[in-house]
Amino acid sequence: MNDHTTPLRQDIRVLGEMLGNILVHHGGEELLNKVESIRKLTKDLRSQPDASTYEKLKEEINNLKPPMRSQVIRAFSIYFHLVNIAEQNHRIRRRREYQLREDHGAQPFSLESAVKNLKANDFSKDVIQDVLNKLSLELIITAHPTEATKRTVLEIQKRIAKILKQLDHPQLTKSEREELKDSLQNEVTVLWQTDELRERKPTVMDEVRNGLYYFDQTLFDVLPDVHQELEARLNESYPDEDWFVPNFLRFGSWIGGDRDGNPNVTPEITWQTLQKQRGLILEKYEEVLIELMKRFSHSTAQVTVTDELAQSVQEGETLIGADKKWRVEKEIYRRKFAIILERLRKVGESEVGYEHSEELLEDLKQIQSSAATHQPSHKELKKLRKLIRQVELFGFHLATLDIRNHSGEHESAVAELLKKVGIESDYSERSEREKLHILQQVLKDPRPISLLNEDYSEATQEMLNVFQMIRNAHKEFGERSIEVYLISMTESASDLLEVLVLAKEAGIYRLHADGTVESNINIAPLLETVDDLVAGPEILKTLFEMDVYSKHLGKRGNHQEIMLGYSDGSKDGGTLTANWRLYKAQQEIHEMAREYSVGLKFFHGRGGSLGRGGGTLNRSLLSQPAETLGDGVKITEQGEVLSSRYLLRDIAYRSLEQGASTLLEGAANVSQESEQAYNREQAWEKTMEEISDVALEKYQSLVFGDQDFLTYFNEATPLQELSELNIGSRPMKRKDSSKFENLRAIPWVFAWTQSRQLLPAWFASGSGLASYADKGSEQLEQLQHMYNNWPFFRSTINNLQMALTKADIQTAKEYTALVNDEAIGKRIFQTIVEEYNRTKDILLKITGDEELLDHQPTIKESVRLRNPYVDPMNFLQVELIKELRQSEDKNDELLTEVLLTISGIAAGLRNTG
């Protein structure tokens, strides 16, 4: 074991001992001994599989009865929460150690490292500045799948993390250390004594509040810090240059705007969300302004301010009234801050309040310009400079809210509108060519097609209300409040034109009599299925060649956003094929857009789990076609990863720094426009096409070709029980149907993860890779070469390694006992086992390693240490589900215990869906 893990192991040992004290307090030595006995048996079973050990373990678990049983489950679950906190604290500790070591270079994937690499490779100031001016990385928080951990529990975890960090301080006295350890024991006790399961499903506004928590706690401060750190490192490496670092890194949100399949997201809810967001950001500004007001105690008896500032103070005090002005006349900056605070408090309430955030920016920059005339150093103004950047980043809207809905909903609404005015009686039945003709004619006519006094169906009226709400939001909160309308399940060009028609009805898109247009919304297709990804380039080409759409794009800066779905493509075609189709779609769309001089922004709808495109931010970026890094990049940060990435300030900073540094270096390299910069060869792409075809056939032969597969999935996983876990406001299925296509990708992945099979994250990849490697030694050597030299392929192989490591076939076998037809359970499980072994074998041949994840020993060790604690919950889960499903009456106690195992396994594997 490496020496650097010693502090981590010490933290885990201390926390484990504290948990042991609590177990004794609540359940006596009997509870502690029971937990230890089960843990030891599972550990022994891991190190030396043995039939007698297995039987002893099964006996121990079968003999558990309430209330002891739920306490044992909670003991293992709480332990994982503590381990997760300790590991996060260790990441922070390692980063500080790196920064303190003078004999070491910059930390990999740091902003310092990125700038030093650019300098070493002779990138000029002009090239770097040009890259910065075009750079764009947007991270979009979503509620699905919502964090399985309750907000209250997250607060406790944050306090524990803070104490662990304080205990690392080298100059603590003995009494200070003892006091901190007492506080730590108290927090672990509170964690044990707090219910980890929600009593009810969260409402959309609950999810909004949960999302805003991260803006409040970390993102408001961390986001400007990343920009200012980059500026500092550029000034350090290029001291003779003047640098301008634009606000290239931003956050947005889907929470409260994502209507796809969630009837709870209404126009009223979206409006409330925007109000909540504005309320929070105004509070944050007020806190900083009050602090700045304390610091700017300068007197005009000591300094001279600019005439511009003096005049603005006179005018501002007239506006707010004498009773609100600062009482000390010579303290001119405080007089100015008093005006700013009063105007900020009246935003949205009266004419005194600011109408736009640009007005606040102007006032702050007046102070900055004036203070600079009498400050010896700009560094004294760092807090003011940070606030200016915060206002530039967050405005009065905090985070741009995307609106998303299903293409079928738009088609139904447009069909009804067209029928009511007699343009087309049966629009939905028309061919794509006919639809495009009809829609273009409507868009070329300035007149609306909706009737003021007409009775529309509830669904159509709701759709019209959504677009009217967007128009009102632009007036009330500014156009940055809602910039993008996303279309789920985009299958054709008409899907985008239908949204443009609905935008026209609300006045968001307007055609004037002289032929000019206004367009105040970006319309983005979401390409999800394998077929849609293949069709994507042709859909966009059709639109780019269309006069009405070109005029719309012209008003949006000739930029087109395209969202790529990682979940449904993987669910329909398997992870390897889906990821390759995503890669190819980006390449083809990028090349085609260049021909039409259209700028792109690719929006990657990644999940937190591997089966939905998950992984760290920097690895997500590295796995894209290199040439697209110069386009705008947008990525979802889904509910389950928010706490692990953004709960703690240092972790949040590191995650964002990794993404920003990767994008900066990647975009700079691509700016050289050489094939070498793209890091691939054409032969590799042909190889991937062959591998993908075989993998797709293998995947679909099981998922769609085996008539018993759905039975196996429904019975050999806790899918049925997941709906009772109150973690999200959105239904598990798009429709009340048991059909595979109506099942959401999230419960699909969540269920497989719980049963330790993780099938969506790896299945069929082995068949694809092995089919190519088995052709001969040259083919295997080529795969090895691709792994060493192509970031996309390396990322793909490493994600497969991670998936196989987190999966556990021995434990997964237990779930076959839940399949009513034993023959079905055995047969399909055997197919899964054979493919698992095939995949593991080929991965090791490609990487040249002896074991999976040899290249990431820290993660490998983390998984190895967790397994003996996850296994008991899997064993318990199987027994409890079996009992629950056989129970004739509803058994709330049994269901609660099942849900506790689900929550615990999610914490242990650090994944929900």
Image (cartoon, helix red, strand yellow):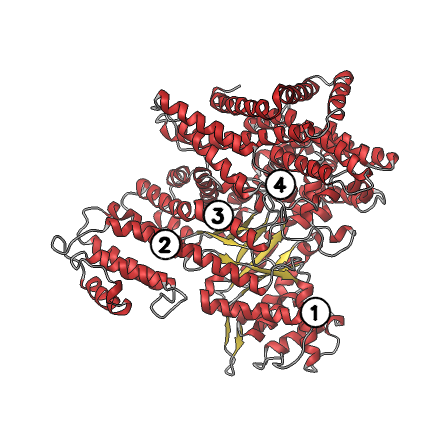
- Residue 55 visible within the image: yes
Residue behind mark 4: 197
**Which residue is pictured at 38% across the width and 62% down the height?**
357
Q: Earlier in the sequence, mark 2 or mark 4?
A: 4
Spatial distance from mark 4 to mark 1, Cα to Cα? 39 Å
Q: Please tell me how crowded label 3 is: few (under 14), some (14-19), or many (20+) other residues with Cα within 10 Å.
A: some
Where's the C terminus, which quadrant? top right
Q: Which mark is residue 285?
A: 2
Q: Please tell me how crowded label 4 is: few (under 14), some (14-19), or many (20+) other residues with Cα within 10 Å.
A: some
Residue behind mark 3: 213
Q: Amino acid at mark 3?
A: Tyr
Q: Please tell me how crowded label 2 is: few (under 14), some (14-19), or many (20+) other residues with Cα within 10 Å.
A: some
- Residue 762 visible within the image: no
Query: Between residues 721 and 767, which one lies in front from this camera angle?
Result: 721
Image location (x, y in percent) of residue 431: 74, 70
SS class of the residue under badge 2?
A: helix
Q: Which mark is residue 412?
A: 1
Q: Earlier in the sequence, mark 3 or mark 2?
A: 3
The reply to whether callout 4 and callout 1 are in contact (CB within 8 Å) is no
Left or right, residue 577 beside residue 516: right
Q: Please tell me how crowded label 1 is: few (under 14), some (14-19), or many (20+) other residues with Cα within 10 Å.
A: some
Q: Amino acid at mark 2?
A: Tyr
Q: Amino acid at mark 1?
A: Ser
